[in-house]
Image: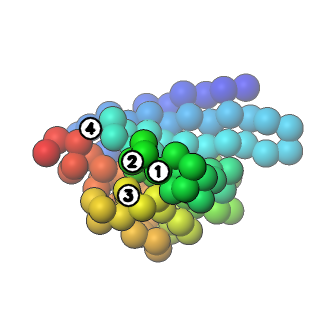
Amino acid sequence: MIRVIPYTIRGVAVVGVEVKLPKTTLLAVSTDIGYIMCGALDVGLLNERLANRDIIAGRAVGVRTLEELMEAPLESVTLHAETIGIRIGMKGREALERMLEHAVS
């Protein structure tokens, strides 16, 4: 089953996506310029093989719901996410807020 859930952060709409798979659930919350995702995200791949895409993304592990994803500290972030101030240890919601700040600029 796939659920798409709208959220509002600082008055801006973001989209949460939950994909139920056998024995796991994929979780992501996306803004216009980047996203945060559960442990299934391969940050190394984004930084190395897809570096030319300048992807802004962060990964939180051990989360089971979209709400947990937004409150969990990020375990890893892409190099391009770091350029806009997103850091390891930052809560997912804070990373989304940073993305929203830079989407408007």
Amino acid carrying label 4: it is Val
Identify the mark at residue 12; answer none if there is no mark: 4
Q: In what element is the residue under mark 2?
A: loop
Pointer 4 local density, CA inside 10 Å: few below 14, some 14–19, many at least 20: few
Identify the mark at residue 54; answer none if there is no mark: 2
User: Residue placed at 60% from the left, 52% from the top?
Assistant: 45
Q: Is residue 102 above or below residue 59?
A: above
Pointer 2 local density, CA inside 10 Å: few below 14, some 14–19, many at least 20: some
Q: Nearer the viewer, mark 3 or mark 1?
A: 1
Q: How is the image coloured?
A: rainbow
Amino acid carrying label 1: it is Ala
Identify the mark at residue 83; answer none if there is no mark: none
Identify the mark at residue 81; answer none if there is no mark: 3
Q: In what element is the residue under mark 3?
A: helix
- Considering only order in the chain, which callout, 2 or 3, is on the residue closer to the N terminus? 2
Query: Residue 4: in sight, yes or no?
Result: yes
User: Mark 1–mark 2 contact, CB under 8 Å?
Assistant: yes
User: Residue placed at 79% from the left, 45% from the top?
Assistant: 24
Where does the N terminus fall, quadrant-wise? top right
Q: Nearer the viewer, mark 1 or mark 4?
A: 1
User: Residue placed at 26% from the left, 37% from the top?
Assistant: 12
Q: Nearer the viewer, mark 2 or mark 4?
A: 2
Amino acid carrying label 2: it is Asp
User: Residue placed at 57% from the left, 49% from the top?
Assistant: 49
Q: Nearer the viewer, residue 1 or 100?
A: 100
- Considering only order in the chain, which callout, 3 or 4, is on the residue closer to the N terminus? 4
Pointer 1 local density, CA inside 10 Å: few below 14, some 14–19, many at least 20: some
Where does the C terminus fall, quadrant-wise? top left
Identify the mark at residue 51; answer none if there is no mark: 1
- Considering only order in the chain, which callout, 4 or 1, is on the residue closer to the N terminus? 4
Q: Position of residue 73 (x, y in %)?
A: 50, 68
